[in-house]
Amino acid sequence: MWKVEKNYVYVTLEWLQKLEQELKFLREERRVEIAEKLKEAISFWDLSENAEYEEARNDQAQVELRISELEDQLKNVKIIKEEKSTKENRVIIWKEVTILNLESDEEWAYKIVWTTESSILAEIPKISNDSPIWKALLWKNIWDVVKVKSYAWTTEYKIVSIK
């Protein structure tokens, strides 16, 4: 079982490779693209009302910020392995959990992952281990009812399946 320690960014090997690929792309390709845009925009001379120059500078700032974020994350990375839990009916990280909203009667499936891997746009949305839903579901069993509280609402969910 893994122990959570502060100041580390916990990632799977697969996610670490994605972060490293993104950093490489930003450094080696995106920076070059933006430098070319800046060079072209500067050739128009009047920088005070040069929309292309402003856009390229904004792109440059966003890319440099993301590079800085990735470098900080990668300095403190700790690789963790996905566990194959013997407690098949317990909610832990990397489990796919289907929950039923007891008010609306809607079902949702989520995969619970570390914060750095979360993506609500994934085929099965990946929710962060920092989310209120995760905190309510942790260590619960199939058919348990959990109450999820946020600042604005409280909802009850039933755990329908755990994979």
Image: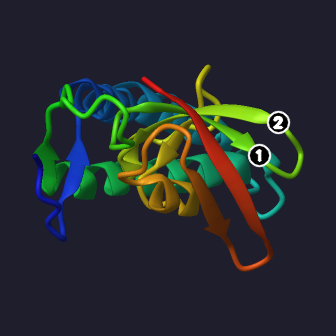
Q: Amino acid at mark 1?
A: Asn
Most extreme residue toward the right is 104
Q: Is residue 110 above or below residue 7?
A: above
**Which residue is depicted at the point 48% across and 53% down?**
137
| Closest to the observer, 112 or 104 | 104
Q: Is residue 76 above or below residue 163?
A: below
Q: Are marks 1 and 2 in contact (CB under 8 Å)?
A: yes
Q: Quadrant of residue 100?
A: top right
Whether residue 126 sits left or right of residue 116 in the image: it is right
Q: Return the x and y of residue 69 as percentages of the image width and height.
A: 36, 56
Q: Quadrant of residue 104?
A: top right
| Closest to the observer, 57 or 163 | 163
Whether residue 69 sits left or right of residue 157 in the image: it is left
Reading the image, the residue beneath label 2 is: 106
Q: Return the x and y of residue 151 as percentages of the image width and height.
A: 72, 79
Q: Is residue 150 above or below residue 113?
A: below
Reading the image, the residue beneath label 1 is: 101
